[in-house]
Image (cartoon, rainbow, N blue to C red):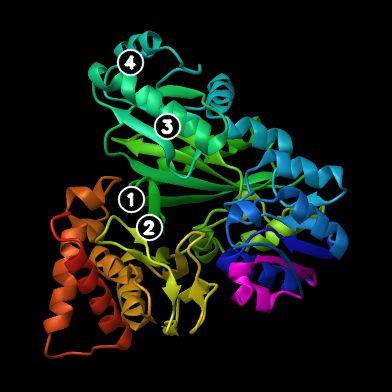
Amino acid sequence: MLNKVLIANRGEIAVRIMRACKELGITSVAVFSDADKNALFVKYADEKYHIGPGPASQSYLQKQKIIDVALKAKADGIHPGYGFMAENAEFAELCHKNGIEFIGPPVSAMELMGSKIDSKKSMMKAGVFVVPGVTEAIKDHERAKDIAHEIGYPIMLKASAGGGGIGIQMVEDEKKMEKALDTVRQLAKNSFGDDAVFIEKFINDPRHIEYQVIGDKHGHLIHCYERECSVQRRHQKLIEETPSCALTSKLREEIGKQAVLVAKTAGYYNAGTCEFMFKDGKYYFLEMNTRLQVEHPITEATTGVDLAREQLRVASGFELEYTQDQIHPRGHSIECRINAEDPLNNFTPAPGKIMRYAEPSGPGIRVDSGVYPGFTIPPFYDSMIAKLIIWAEDRPRAIERTKRALWEFQISGVRHNIPFHQVVMNHPQFIKGTYDTSFIPRYQILNQVVDHVKEMKTQSTGPKTAAAMAAVEAVIIAASNTQGNG
């Protein structure tokens, strides 16, 4: 077993990994910026080292500085969490060169899946069902137009090295192609240092379904079934659930086999996620995230597999504790990402000092967070406050339990998106399970959030928690500042 692991990340995921280390008897090492000197993950770690100023480019993205700390601390493993350098093959290679175990997949798999063009070529050859499109980098306007005509508008321009919803643009017709291609190429170059862009058929309003896979270094590879991730804004997820209402038992098993095929084709081990688009009974492999996902806890809730623990064990050379026929999901789980952001102002991040913070509790409720009362959410990083994870025997009870937990959640001092989650949990299309990636704009969810908080504000009877009133004040203030923005 690894003896000491440096967590090259921050916030709730750093705490999550440290907890897994604690259970396995592994010493945890935190690295932190000026902005995180009082963060919960720093307090939780067995050892901690300062690595620079607040901006990530000067701290958490400093590869050599993190390696130097790991060597100084005599850490034999580095867990990258998600974001920052979790999918950075160069960093993983740097770990290996310094005799440090990178707790993730092999560099070759990261390099393959880090290029959407190369990965698509490999998957097509292996027999994986992919989104219709081309596997070449497009630089010429005329070539782009020719391909778009062959595929049929609308199409998607996608950065080959992209991620997190960055470097994606839908093009409706030929008139917009030239400007769109130039824009996406420049964005790709600025964001990822690679201006390679390719074209795929735009699938209108699909469902976004992903499969959790995990493998060991002994050739064992399994999937832990799916997560539905269709409630999104700007291609970024806000609510996830498992199982998906869209899949039949037959489709569930079929797509699971495709996910394992993807991972085997990549020569994969450790935890990863295969993402698919699903519509009208058809599914298409989209990409693979070569890391642990934000929403991994709902898979843990339904399967009983501790994914962070398995990651550490795999990195230590052990075989998986499970075989495929031992994975039997039970019940239903929902995750709500609780963010410090303004849902009435295009989900703009809203950093600041948390004055009141109290988590819900009770059967089937888990909260992963990295904050506490008095903690200041920095402006430099993702705006996540916490992840609310709910489990129940079935979906209707999971939704009811989520409603209750959101009602109990107390946060004040910063604007947050709890009212948004409350609206979604009460929306008839979500309750029916008949939603897709167009859910937020199609049903004008943000307008409903305004109505929801106004009702909370004027309600004269019924329980009113500090959380509810803080949410009301935050959103009413936001609404008054965004008149005319829809």
Residue 44 in magenta? yes
Q: Along the horizontal axis of the image, is 204 left or right of 109?
A: left
Image marks 2 and 1: residues in contact by CB distance under 8 Å: yes
Residue for badge 1 = 233
Residue for badge 3 = 284
Res 439 label: none
Report, in whole angstroms, how far the alpha carbon at label 4 lies from the one at label 1.
26 Å
Residue for badge 2 = 238
Q: Along the horizontal axis of the image, is 190 left or right of 344?
A: right
Secondary structure of the residue carrying numbered label 4 = helix
Report, in whole angstroms, how far the alpha carbon at label 2 lies from the one at label 1.
7 Å
Residue, x 13% and y 91% (percent of image)?
Answer: 461
Q: Which residues are magenta?
A: 25-46
Residue, x 64% and y 30% (percent of image)?
Answer: 265
Residue 92 picture location, percent across and down: 74, 44
Identity of the amino acid at label 3? Tyr
| 3 vs 1, front mark | 1
Report, in whole angstroms, how far the alpha carbon at label 3 lies from the one at label 1.
21 Å
Identity of the amino acid at label 2? Leu
Identity of the amino acid at label 4? Ala
Earlier residue among tags 4 and 3: 4
Identity of the amino acid at label 1? Arg
433 or 346, which lies in front?
346
